[in-house]
Image (tube, rainbow, N blue to C red):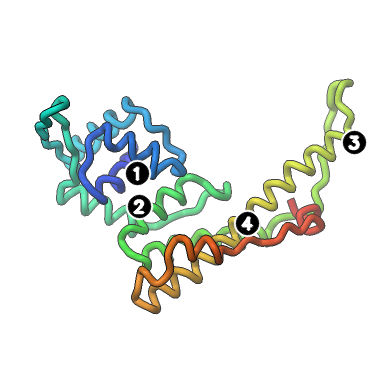
Amino acid sequence: MKADYTLLGVLARQPMSGYGLAKWLETDGQFLGRKPSMTPIYRALADLADRGWVEATTVARESAPDAKVYALTPDGRAAFEEWARGPYTPSPRPMDAEFTVRLNFAGQLGPDVALALVRTELDYRLRQRAEEAGPYRLGPVQPIPEIDVRWLERLTFFTHSRGWQSTSWYIGWLETMVAELTSIIDAGDYSTRTPTDLAATAHHPPIDENRGAERT
């Protein structure tokens, strides 16, 4: 079974029960692409315990059943840091959940770790964009009589254009993150800009329909 670094990363923030982990994934972790299902969570916690990376303590509660709270062991902390500072290979698919997990949890170790991850992801996406061919052309098809080939080509163009524009936005966000993280490191101050400030100044590339039509 593959080690669950998402749960390890959450427990690096604070000890939690299995139920607490599920609630965190449902709220704060809702964009990580992980369902807050109890059975997989407890299965993963059992695996982490078998590895010696987490240990459970039973906490008595007056108005509810006792809770089993999980925390990282010294070996768990070492395993988490090894993963967080280890090599990261971007997925061919933009906006893959693995990068989000890495940034959220490996990035906890400091802005330098987060910046290295974002730069790796950005460099890969820029190379990927440079290698894209265009304009898009529908390949040979033999559709059923109910499908008009001209409409099929147009519809496929729309879906490819959507993907191209989404990736353009993503690249812009990565570039903004590099600038913000570099500024934070240079200033040595993590609180110079609030989340509201970042939202107000986030880079949103303008939609260029002609460019999107040529490279999909």
Q: CA distance from mark 1 to mark 4?
A: 26 Å
Q: CA distance from mark 4 to mark 3?
A: 29 Å
Q: CA distance from mark 2 to mark 1?
A: 7 Å
Q: Residue at x 60, y 62 (%)?
A: 172
What residue type is disc 2 on? Answer: Phe
Measuring from the top left, give residue 69's x and y in whole percent.
17, 37
For mark 2, does the 10 Å Cα neighbourhood hold few (<14), some (14 to 19), or many (20 or more) residues?
many
What residue type is disc 1 on? Answer: Thr
**Of the pair 193 and 36, the residue shown nearer to us:** 193
Q: Which residue lies under the disc numbered 2? A: 105
Measuring from the top left, give residue 208's x and y in whole percent.
76, 59
Whether residues under marks 2 and 1 lie with C-beta atoms below 8 angstroms apart, the answer is yes
Tell me which numbered mark, 2 or 4, is placed earlier along the sequence: 2
Q: Which residue lies under the disc numbered 1? A: 6
Res 119 visible: no
> With 167 as the anchor, is 97 left or right in this view?
left
Measuring from the top left, give residue 128's x and y in whole percent.
63, 57
Q: CA distance from mark 1 to mark 3?
A: 46 Å
Q: Which residue lies under the disc numbered 3? A: 150
Q: Which residue lies under the disc numbered 4? A: 169
Q: CA distance from mark 2 to mark 4?
A: 23 Å
